[in-house]
């Protein structure tokens, strides 16, 4: 059903290696992207924001890491919430031990639009150390939202989806210096830095500097490492990269660093 809507809100409930969950919704329907926090925390967030659970039409899942699916079983079993991801990601999630309600499983294709309530959604592949990892590009009215939270580098396939966004949720996982000087074992540092790991602050800043445009109204820096990053370093690196390249913000772009374990303020894309 395609209804005219007057509002469009986005919110990060939690972003980082302890749990990822994002909400996008209008006055009629909403969707969740990832369910890496408990179903109880999700329910509380919705209640606090006067959003009914019945208005949530589904949850989109990016990959099988626990920080993205922690609440998924309960959401399907207790709330009968349909969950959408690719066949390969489902295969990696569904083991004999998982208790996901069979009726809630929805398999989606890669790079092919599908419609869910008022949202046109397209999954695109990203490079990360899970059997398959996807980002989501979502069109709602005339707004485009792209979410890419776990990726070792931004490949040619993913880049156009990121560049097309009005609101971009992009990973800025680690400060290169903190990771190098930190206590992680060598193999783990190598995994994080690899093309199938996570994006560092300089990588993300360079991508944004190369691709900043007037269309990009909201930049949400996401999935910060608890041990190898701080919100201050994320912003400093971005400001430094922009000033080095002579990039002057047009004053309309809003930049936020998403909190690791608390909901951010609701971003109103249409009001
Ligand atoms: Zn993650
Ligand atoms: Zn991951």
Image: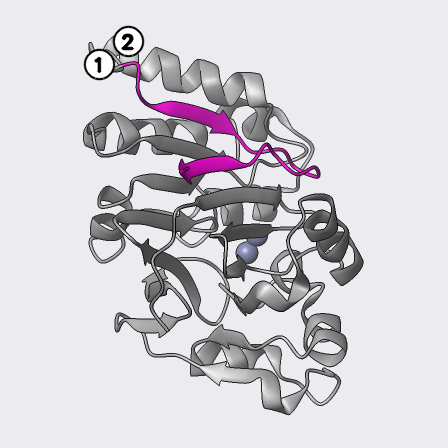
Residue at far right of view: 40
Residue 44 drawn at (x, y percent): 77, 51
Q: Nearer the viewer, residue 1 or 221?
A: 1
Q: Which residue is drawn at the image coordinates 37% and 13% (left, top)?
A: 239
Q: Is residue 184 above or below residue 194?
A: above
Q: Nearer the viewer, residue 78 or 249?
A: 78
Q: Is residue 25 above or below residue 215?
A: below
Left or right: 180 as drawn, with respect to 152:
right
Residue on which the image places disc 1: 247
Residue 246 drawn at (x, y percent): 20, 9
Q: Is residue 84 above or below residue 119?
A: below
Left or right: 152 as drawn, with respect to 262:
left
What is the total number of numbered labels drawn onto the structure image? 2
The kind of secondary structure element at disc 1 is loop
Magenta-colored span:
251-271
Residue 261 sits in quarter? top right
Q: Is residue 58 magenta?
A: no
Q: Is residue 244 above or below residue 224?
A: above
Q: Which residue is drawn at the image coordinates 56% and 16% (left, top)?
A: 232
Q: Which residue is drawn at the image coordinates 61% and 30% (left, top)?
A: 228
* Label 1 CA crowd tier, 10 Å (few <14, some 14–19, many 20+): few
Tell me if residue 33 can be seen. yes
The kind of secondary structure element at disc 2 is helix
Residue on which the image places disc 2: 243
Q: Is residue 262 magenta?
A: yes
Q: Which residue is drawn at the image coordinates 49% and 74% (left, top)?
A: 84
Real-space Cα separation, disc 2 to disc 1, in angstroms: 6 Å
Q: Nearer the viewer, residue 255 or 265?
A: 265
């Amino acid at each position: 059903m395609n209804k005219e809507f007057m509002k469009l809100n986005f919110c990060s409930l939690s972003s980082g290696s302890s749990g990822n969950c994002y909400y996008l919704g209008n006055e009629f329907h909403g969707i969740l992207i990832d369910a890496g926090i408990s179903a109880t925390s999700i329910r509380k967030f919705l209640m606090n924001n006067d959003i009914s659970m019945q208005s949530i039409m589904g949850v989109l899942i990016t990959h099988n890491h626990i920080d993205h699916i922690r609440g998924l079983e309960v959401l399907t079993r207790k709330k009968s919430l349909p969950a959408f991801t690719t066949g390969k990601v489902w295969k990696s999630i569904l083991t004999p031990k998982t208790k996901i309600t069979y009726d809630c499983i929805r398999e989606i294709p890669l790079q092919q639009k599908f419609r869910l309530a008022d949202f046109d959604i397209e999954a695109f592949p990203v490079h990360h150390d899970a059997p398959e990892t996807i980002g989501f590009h979502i069109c709602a009215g005339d707004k485009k939202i792209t979410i890419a939270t776990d990726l070792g580098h931004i490949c040619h396939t993913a880049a156009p989806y990121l560049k097309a966004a009005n609101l971009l949720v992009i990973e800025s996982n680690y400060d290169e210096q903190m990771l190098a000087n930190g206590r992680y074992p060598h193999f783990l540092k190598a995994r994080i830095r690899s093309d199938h790991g996570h994006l560092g602050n300089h990588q993300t800043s360079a991508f944004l500097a190369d691709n900043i445009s007037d269309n990009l109204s909201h930049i949400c820096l996401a999935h910060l490492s608890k041990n190898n990053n701080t919100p201050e370093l994320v912003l400093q690196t971005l400001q430094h990269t922009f000033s080095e390249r002579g990039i002057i913000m047009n004053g309309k772009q809003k930049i936020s660093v998403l909190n690791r374990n608390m909901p951010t303020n609701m971003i109103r894309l249409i009001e």
